[in-house]
Amino acid sequence: MAILVHLPSFMAGPITAALQRTAPDIPVWNGREAAPPEAVEAIIAWGLKPGVLPTYPNLRLVCAATAGVDKLLAAPDLPEGMPVTRIVDPGQQTGIAHYVLATALRHARGLGTYAEQQRRGEWKRHPGRDLSRCRVGVLGLGEIGSAVARMFAAIGYPVAGWSRSGKGIPGVTDYTGDEGFAAMLSKSDILVCALPLTSQTNGLLNRQTLSLLPAGAFFINVGRGEHLVEADLIALIDAGHLAGAALDVFAKEPPAADDPIWNHPRIEATPHIAADPSYELVAQQCVENLRRARDGRELLNQVDRNAGY
Ligand code: NDP
């Protein structure tokens, strides 16, 4: 019985090798062509096209190769009751927090403005912002959002966070529910999205909600592109309400050649690199969960399929 790696090639090779190092006793197939369908017990994937899952009659487990599971849960033929697990990697959480901090500090310290001035040969000082005008709001206080919130709090920024349950993180003001969402946005000079993509969060950041942000606010998206209505963001930046944005995720990756973000002077775009999980850890968590599934034990990092994350 075996593991099937069904991933884009840039991840498939390293994860296959890591699985082989982690569990030399378990056969691993990289790609569907070579894998005998009845042998496949676990699939490690990012997304699954219709028709893939029904091929494997002895499947016990679907493992996401990263923290986000929206693409996997969207598989129309995911059998009811099939356990789905995801990766929880403290190193990835820290990496994403570093990315968010880097982009936020660049904005808060006006480094983009100074870079533009440098290219023009201009020596001009601007008044610094005091921290009380850099209130940070983090949407989603899970593994990633809480790492982001803690890091801002540790360097003295006023931090708030929005979650479903309220997390009680020291130094982070909790907001929950629709009212909490609006209240937090109205006090966020820097808004960070670290939400999972679900039916409730899809399109959450649009003209109406982004307008709640204070004038001059900056938006950072490390969640999913579909959280944001990109045209609405651009309209609010162009109208001068928002100062700009740093986007690591897009509804279409890469964005189309004529997508305005490529040339927008107030938007920094990166190709979904905020941080990858460790491939060794992906392999270890997948193997551990396969062993647990075989023994009927509780799985690590099992997704709540009803909640969608
Ligand atoms: P978690 O599942 O640990 O946390 C999700 C958080 O979102 C929880 O705090 C949850 O609240 C909150 N939440 C979910 N739905 C709602 C809602 N309707 N209203 C309010 N709060 C809500 O996820 P992670 O932190 O591990 O990952 C978050 C996302 O980050 C992933 O789903 C993925 O999309 C993205 N990601 C991006 C990467 C990148 O490179 N840019 C890399 C990896 C992940 P509660 O705590 O109350 O349940």
Image (tube, rainbow, N blue to C red):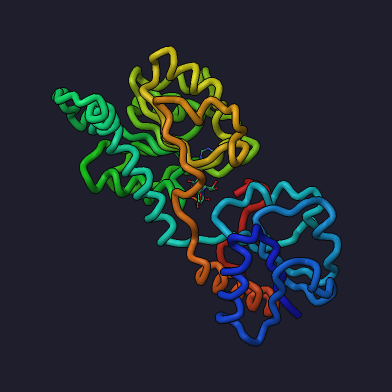
**Residue in front for this viewpoint, 267 or 178:** 267
Tell me which residue sits at (81%, 52%) in the image: 77
- Residue 238 appears left or right of 294: left
Residue at 72% in and 46% down: 74
Determine the image quadrant of residue 118.
top left
Q: Position of residue 82 (x, y in %)?
A: 74, 61
Q: Is residue 45 left or right of residue 279?
A: right
Question: Foreground: 19 or 213?
Answer: 19
- Residue occupying the point 67% across, 82% down: 26
**Image position of 130 with respect to 272: above or below:** above
From the viewer's perspective, tell me whether residue 92 is left or right of residue 27.
left
Measuring from the top left, give residue 5's x and y in whole percent: 68, 67
Q: Using residue 145 as the reference point, say whether residue 49 is left or right of it.
A: right
Q: Residue at x 44, y 49 (%)?
A: 274
| Quadrant assignment, res 220 | top left
Q: Taking the image as drawn, is residue 90 in sight?
A: yes
Residue 153 in picture, x, y percent from top left? 27, 44
Dividing the picture into quarters, in which one does residue 288 lie? bottom right
- Does residue 201 appear anywhere in the picture? no
Q: Quadrant of the N terminus?
A: bottom right
Q: Nearer the viewer, residue 157 or 267?
A: 267
